[in-house]
Amino acid sequence: MMTLRERLLTTLRGGVSDRIPWNIHASLLPQTPAARAMQRRGLGLTASCRTYRAIHEGVTIHEERQETDGRPLLRVRIETPAGMLTEEATIESQHGSRWIRKFFSGHLVIGCTEDFPPSEFAKTYTAIGQAMAAYQGYAW
């Protein structure tokens, strides 16, 4: 008998598994007794994880969550020695997707000329580091 991982990999590679892999993204499955029973019967869970992390030097990032017009609002503030940047996004209630209402400068639109120095500082002093150590122990 194949494991769920073997079934998924076999199917994704165009092979034939011993039965159809049954899989769902973990964030879509409610935490209920019925869900746990389905997992015991072979339902697999897929999760997303980053293999990298941003390392910020001289940059402080603050996240603030609040409710606006009955919808969750996420405000992210990046503070640098050269100034501050802010992004605002609403959080979609069903899947948690972010809908950005105001972009950080430098992504698509620079809000004003005062946004350029902090944006340039944040970009210059951000490095990419490995994040896989946080996921050791998972069955890859």
Image (tube, rainbow, N blue to C red):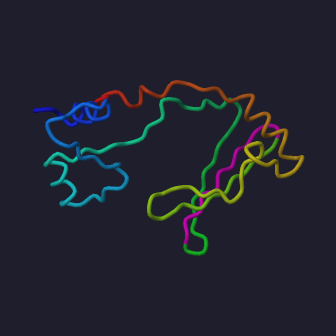
The residue that appears at 43% across and 27% down in the rendered structure is 132
Q: Can you name the residue that lies furthest to the bottom here?
A: 69
Q: Is residue 25 left or right of residue 65?
A: left
Is residue 75 found inside the magenta-colored segment of the image? yes
Q: Is residue 25 left or right of residue 68?
A: left
Most extreme residue toward the left is: 1
The quadrant of the picture occupied by the C terminus is top left
Residue 66 falls in image quadrant? bottom right
Q: Nearer the viewer, residue 14 or 21?
A: 14
**Percent coordinates x, y for residue 127 in the rendering:** 64, 26
- Percent from the top left, x then y, of residue 22? 23, 47
Task: Check residue 72 for magenta coloring.
Answer: yes
Residue shown at 27%/58% (left/top)?
Answer: 31
The magenta segment is: 71-82
Magenta span dominant secondary structure: strand
User: At which x and y percent is residue 137?
Assistant: 30, 28
Relative depth, front residue between 25 and 123: 25
Residue at 24% in and 31% down: 15
In the image, residue 79 sits, relative to residue 10, either above or below, namely below
132 horizontally vs 22: left or right: right
Q: Is residue 23 left or right of residue 107?
A: left
Between 8 and 30, the residue placed more toward the observer is: 8
| Percent coordinates x, y for residue 78 in the rendering | 70, 44
Can you say which quadrant of the picture contains the N terminus?
A: top left
Q: Quadrant of residue 139?
A: top left
Comparing 132 with 21, the one in front is 21
For the image, the number of numbered tags is: 0
